[in-house]
Amino acid sequence: FRNEGIDLTHNPEFTTCEFYMAYADYNDLMTITESLMSGLVKSVHGSYKVTYHPEGEEGEAFVIDFTPPFRRIHMFPALEEILKVKLPAPDQLSTPEANKLLSDLCEKHQVECPPPRTSARLLDKLVGEFLEEQCVNPTFICDHPQVMSPLAKYHRSIPGLTERFELFVMKKEVCNAYTELNDPAVQRERFEQQAKDKAAGDDEAQLIDENFCTSLEYGLPPTGGWGLGIDRLTMFLTDSNNIKEVLFFPAMKPDDNRTKEEDGKLNPLST
């Protein structure tokens, strides 16, 4: 459950499938994701290809191809190529200079980002506008910066990035996974920065989780963590353009055309 709004692809109560895998990293999880998703689609539809109508049956039809391997987009170099600009170094994104550059890019390209305009939120808006829009067939967007990924392990070769990926289908996120951060000192630093962002008005930032930090101090082996949105995946598999169509108990508005007399007949205890 998340106390957030409702739209065609979001519902406060939703179904997820999650797992942790010891001695695995995000490369292992990408391989598992490709095998799992493509195998599932092939089993259900008899083919790797699915026809989907995002605007309903009368709208345009898209063919989604789940044939592995899935395309991989590395976030920073891909953004630089599209925007034709050199972005700040990933380990410098918390500086005022980096924040100003990202803010100027959003204004230049008319990408809206309501306050607080943190570097993480600005980057997220740019990625949504320029990278996620490319992802019709299953596509991994990889190597998010640390400012966007407080629980993900730092990248083994690029300072400031993390070993994280998100899988997008029809421009919508269906899977999020990363090599877990298992250093308690670094995790606490990340939480402290998140708490500052939270205080500045970032609703998506996290507070310091003392129990989690304490647990890490006892020891966590190298681990990969993975989560999949079941409802969104079901939408694509069943050609449903509204998440309500795949929920057991969707939030529905009452029928205002019913009379009070009819309500009484349906629910005699109401009087």
Image: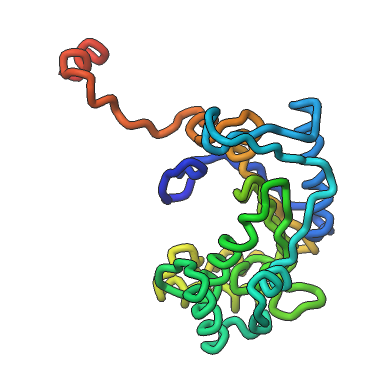
The residue at the point 84 percent across, 50 percent down is: 31
How is colour applied across the structure in the image? rainbow
Residue 210 coordinates in the image, percent (x, y): 55, 68
Identity of the residue drawn at 80% across and 46% down: 34
Q: Quadrant of residue 49?
A: top right
Query: Number of callouts in the render?
Result: 0
Q: Residue sitting at 23 percent across and 22 percent down?
A: 257
| Residue at 40% from the left image edge and 34% from the top image edge | 251
Viewport quadrant of the C terminus: top left
Position of 43 relative to 147 (above/below): above
Q: Position of residue 227 (x, y in %)?
A: 66, 49
Residue 192 in sight here = no
Q: Is residue 43 left or right of residue 108?
A: right
- Of residue 113 and residue 248, the one placed in the foreground of this image is 113
**Above or below, 10 relative to 85:** above
Considering every residue shown, the one lying at the far top of the view is 265
Q: Position of residue 195 (x, y in %)?
A: 48, 73
Say which of 245 and 13 sits in front: 245
Q: Is residue 149 visible?
A: yes
Where does the image place residue 255, in percent across and percent down from the top left? 28, 25
